[in-house]
Structures are given as structure tokens and as C-alpha cells.
Amino acid sequence: MDDLLLRRVRPGLGGEPADVLISDGRIAAITGPGEGSATRVIDGHGGTLLPGLVDAHVHVVQWSTFRRRISLDAAKSAAEAVELLLAHLLATPGRPEELVVGAGFRDGLWPDKPHKDLLQHALPGRPVALFSADLHTLWLSPAALRLIGRDHPTGVLLENDCMSATAELPSAPVDVQDAWVAEAVAAANARGVTGIVDYEYADTVTDWTRRLGDGPLNARIGCVIARHLLDTAIERGHRTGDVLPGSDGLLRVGPFKLFVDGSLNTRTAYCHDPYPEGDTVGLLELPPEELVPLMRKAAENGLAPAVHAIGDQANTIALDAFAELGCTGRIEHAQLLSPRDVPRFARLGVVASVQPAHQPDDRDVADRHWHGRTDRAFPYRALLESGARLEIGSDAPVSPLDPWDGIASAVGRTDDDRPAWHPEQAIPLADALAAASGGRRGIAVGDVADLMITAADPSHLSPADLRAMPITATLLAGRLTHVSA
């Protein structure tokens, strides 16, 4: 590939105008404006050159499918969710036997409860599947339950029941799904994304290897190993960080994913203190006597554990397991932490993989269900100041695959006109950008040319302006994956 010159860019936050030469996929030189030359030139129009963004937690097929589902984000009750569903179907009616799929509802504050009878009354005999925003609840109509050969008293399936039923629902053909994935990655490129860690509950190694045959990949992909594929991964000789053959370095083996608990919105996050409405402390998916052997088997075979833990007791259990085994890895989400557990991330070398966009989405349900504890919810500054490594993801489709949304939420602790929620846990922009860029800070000669050019310097922008950041160009190993019109 010919050398590429990025003309009229400002390397790094607050950077001065420069020309940046890219050769063989790396930054070869940074010179004064007008001093560089190359056969290919991109005009940065004075924009800021920054490391490309890495979304550290995505469910790629679910996200690409979610973009086509009926949105239920605005529903304030079960009845209103059904009304939104009916309004959409009136505008775009489908075949009576066709599965109706909606997504994005949050029932943690609803005055009523979802139930299969509501769907049956609104759409008699129609198969309907509605996914909660956090993907931990699946609300099915009687016809949808019959479609997968199940019966259930309410049609509202949680956690493992939700995930197993999701796998049994009809899905688009593989080639159609792959086309949707390519479109979703292109949309991510337009937001400056150069890397994605795929937490899809599937054989991600096989799926992404297949997609290589459809053309060049436009992002570096970490292929996470699902729990049920641990033995398969070991038999294949996969180890976390390994580059997969034939991928030009774009596909790597990711960590090994395990669940300790559920989620806040379903009130299944496993906590030390009970939820206010009832005597439950949440759901323990993997008790220590099951968690530790699985983590040990993975670590002994070179697969770093990535442990889903949202409630404070779940995080204690996960950190205890890392301490017992002496291995490093990741905790996914870390939404509610006991004060004594905050410094353990750095001490144990455990990455805090967080999704700041969840914080403004969940602030109201946290105020209700974690009342009196929210000073230690989404505690990003506390983690950062303790020396922990933060990595920012979206958990798409729980939040959009757009790291700027997470960056803005980490910096501003709000996404509307309300005051910041626990602003003492906000983190500086430079740290948020690093956490959303795989740990990279700044621009230097020799760096891999996974880069983005922002139309404005983010340094002094408001969270709202950060969230809407225009991207001039995105490059993967010096190859353009997005150029603004």
C-alpha cells in the first residue's frame, strides 16, 4: 500500500498543526504543516488526530439485529410497551405468522408487570418476543412460547431461561446476519471505532473467520470464548491474545466469559444487601465452588477469565476467585462495589471493564433499588484513583455501539438536562479517552495507525458535544475505513 499523508491535523489533545505520514500501517513521521509528502493525501481540515476507539464489550450479532427491531426504549409501563408495539405494526404490518421482535424495554420502574396475556390480548395468536434493554429478560407471547416448545406461567423469562430461549428463537440466515454485522461495523467506523471485543454467546472464532471470506475486516476483533465452548477452545489450542491465522492480525482470541450474577434492571444483580421490594439479594449464577474451577481450567490453558459481576457481592466473589487463583483477567461491568473491593482491582491486576453509558440510563432504577448505596455505584474515579485499569465498552445492544456515548457519560455523569449523578465519580477526559482506546494515550511515531480524526478538539467540549462528536476519518492500520462526506 502506498504511503498516506494526513495533512493539517493536530496530533493529540490540544495538539499543534502537523502533517502525519503513515507507512506500512504505522505512523512513520510527524512533521510541520506543509512539510510532508506522499502519493495519497487526506486533508484533516485542522481536526484532532487521536488513537482509534476500541469498544471493549459488544454482542455483535445481537447489536446488528437490534438495529432492526421495534424500539421499546420509551415505554414507561408494560401497557405502554404494547402500545408502542401496536403503533409500529399498524405502520408496517407483517405476515400474521411472522415473529414480532421488540427490544429495549426497562421494567425496573414500571407500575405494572409484563405478562404473556397482555401480548395475547393485543395480538391474538401472534408470536411476539420482546427483549429488555439489558438482555437479561425475554417477554414472550403464548404463540412465541409454543414456537420454541415451551410453556411458562407469565411468559417473562429471566437470566439462563432468557438466554436459552433466545438461542431457540428463529433467526435470520447466516449470510443475512453477516451482512447486518458488516453494516454495523461500518456504522461503528463512522464513530471512530477501530476495535471491538465480541462477547456474543456463540462460536465467535468460527463466525469471524467465516466473515474474513466476505472481504477485508474493518475493525480488529477480539473473539470472546463462551462458557460452553471452553473445552473446544482448549482443544483448538486457543489462548487469549493469539492472532488467528489468515487474519492479517485483525482477529485475536479474546478472554473466557463467565457470569456470576444477573443485572440491576431485572433485580438479579447479586448484592450484599436485599432489594427494597422483597427479601431477595439477587441471583447467584455461579457460586464460588463452581466459578473457581472454571476459572482455573481456563487460566491454566492460557485463557484469561472475563467475569460478569454487577452487584457488590458478585464483585466480591469474583475478586476472591482471582485472588485465590493468582491469575489476572477482567471483571465485566463492576457496577456496584464495596469500598474494600475498590483497591483490589489494581492489587490483583484485574481490569475493570465498564460501560459508562449505563450509568445515566440506570440512575433512576439504581436510586430506587440500590437506595443508600449509589455513592459506590459506577465508581469510575474511585477505581481510577486506586490504580485500576479501566476499559470502556458499550455492551451493545444494551447501549449503542458508540464509545463517544460512554466517554461523555464517564466525564459528565448525565445524558440529559438533569444535574450530574454522583459527579464525584466523574473522570477526566484524557483518562476516559484512554479507557476507550485500549489504553493508548496520544500519538507518536511508531504507533500502529489505528486512528481517528475528530472534527473538533475534544479538550473543552461539553458532554453533550462529546456525545455528538463529528468524525472526519477513521483508519485501521493506515487503511481508511471511514471518510466523512
Image (spheres, rainbow, N blue to C red):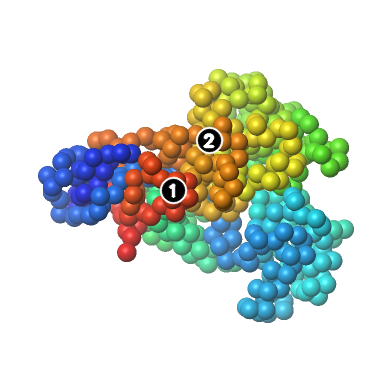
- Mark 2 highlights which residue? 426
Q: Quadrant of residue 141?
A: bottom right
Q: Quadrant of the C terminus?
A: bottom left
Residue 13 horizontal/vertical position (percent): 33, 39
Q: Which mark is residue 170?
A: none
Residue 59 horizontal/vertical position (percent): 57, 51
In this picture, residue 157 sits left or right of residue 30? right
Residue 231 or residue 443, whichever sits in front: 443
Residue 295 horizontal/vertical position (percent): 63, 30
Is residue 290 visible in the rendered image? The answer is: no
Q: Amino acid at mark 1?
A: Leu
Residue at 56% across / 51% down in the picture? 416
Residue at 69% across / 57% down in the picture? 105
- Mark 1 highlights which residue? 466
Residue 371 or residue 140, whichever sits in front: 371
Element carrying mark 2: loop
Label 1 environment density (alpha carbons within 10 Å; few <14, some 14–19, many ≥20)? many
Is residue 153 visible in the rendered image? The answer is: yes
Residue at 53% across / 23% down in the picture? 386
Element carrying mark 1: helix
In this picture, residue 144 sits left or right of residue 51? right
Label 2 environment density (alpha carbons within 10 Å; few <14, some 14–19, many ≥20)? many
Residue at 59% across / 32% down in the picture? 379
Please report contact status of discs 1 and 2: CB closer than 8 Å, yes or no: no
Q: Considering only vertical position in the picture, is 127 above or below 336?
A: below
Residue 478 horizontal/vertical position (percent): 28, 48
Q: CA distance from mark 1 to mark 2?
A: 15 Å
- Of mark 1 and mark 2, the one earlier in the sequence is 2
Q: Amino acid at mark 2?
A: Ala
Residue 14 or residue 474, whichever sits in front: 14
